[in-house]
Amino acid sequence: MHPRRVVKFAQPFDGDVPGKKHGLKVAKAHRMEPKAVYDGGYPLARGVRLRIAAGGPGNSGLVEALSNAFIQYMVESQSTKPFKIAWYLSDTIRSLEYIEHGMVDIAITHNKSAEEDSLFYGHAKKRMFAFCDRFLIVGPTEDPAELQKNADDEHRMLSRLCRVAKSLSPNPKHLPIRFVSRGDGSATHIRECALFSRIGQAPWADIKSTWYHTARNPTAQSSQATLAHAANLSAYTLTDLGTYLSAPKNIRDKLHVFRTGNEDSDDLMMNPSRILMSAKVPGENADLVEQFMEWMDDEDEGGQSIVSDFEINGQHLYSIAPPGY
């Protein structure tokens, strides 16, 4: 009997890991340890044949679900001997450096321009859309800035937030207005900056700001820590769907979701993820990595079906490619 495929319910996770440029020292590659290794339910599986670098999708449990399902597919349908898949916790920029130097075979990334550079310079040989996550604007249930009045437009929401916080518009509820930023260079932080920049605002540049706070936290749970900080401070923040759904109930109960992304390629509240295959995959594993890319593109029995079925707290987290991606 082969092990039954199970879509795991994920634990709280860091929606994004810091996305700033790192000085990767290739000489230390031999000391790079995987965050986890999966065997598809085959305890006698020997040897890692696929190495995946990812941040949030790994912490959410999606990489584990994909890895175990792919191993089972290869063993059951392709008569491959049981093998292992290693997951390396990494942000987008470091993941691209890893595939450049052949330290991993696959990278799940969130920066289209950086991905295109990797392809242009020949570090990656293939790219495909993997799935979409969503960003959320959340805040106190009392809604002191009255963002609910502009629930259909994130730019007007943030514009109103800035105006009320800076006393340029009335504050009818007379409650403190605060916004908590991750401030860590993560994909969430970068998207927050893009949203504020769209309305001509850069609150992080005002060192005397009384309403814009940075929740710097170097731990692997920085997204959860920021969300908890916002909840306890009765503040607004930008987060991702996975972080929100996996937060403790007492945190979610203090927050209201004012805006979420929709499946539109132009929506800045969407967080598309793509898979890149390294040009330096070891020859003995090249065919298997190619098969993983093909399997990930299969909506019927492959990776896209795992993405569609994946849940956190009973709610679907990721969506497959919308038009335009």
Image (spheres, rainbow, N blue to C red):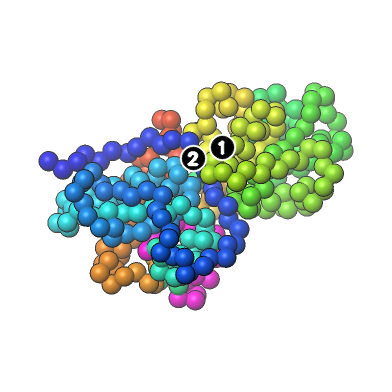
Residue 146, given in percent of the width and then of the height, sits at 74, 30
Name the side, left or right, on which 300 lies relative to 272.
Answer: left
The answer to which image quadrant residue 108 occupies is bottom left
- Label 1 and label 2: CA atoms lie apart by 7 Å
Residue 189, given in percent of the width and then of the height, sits at 64, 49
Do residues under tags 1 and 2 come within 8 Å of each other at their CB atoms? yes
Q: Residue at x 58, y 56 (%)?
A: 19
Q: Is residue 142 above or below residue 158?
A: above
> Quadrant of the image for the N terminus?
top left
**Amino acid marked by disc 2:** Phe
Q: Is residue 185 visible?
A: yes
Name the side, left or right, on which 115 lies relative to 314.
Answer: right
Which range of residues does the magenta coloring cover? 105-122
Q: Residue at x 52, y 67 (%)?
A: 25
**Amino acid marked by disc 1:** Gln
Residue 45, given in percent of the width and then of the height, sits at 21, 51
Residue annotated with mark 1: 224
Name the side, left or right, on which 42 lies relative to 89.
Answer: left
Residue annotated with mark 2: 13
Q: Residue at x 39, y 45 (%)?
A: 62
Q: Earlier in the sequence, mark 1 or mark 2?
A: 2
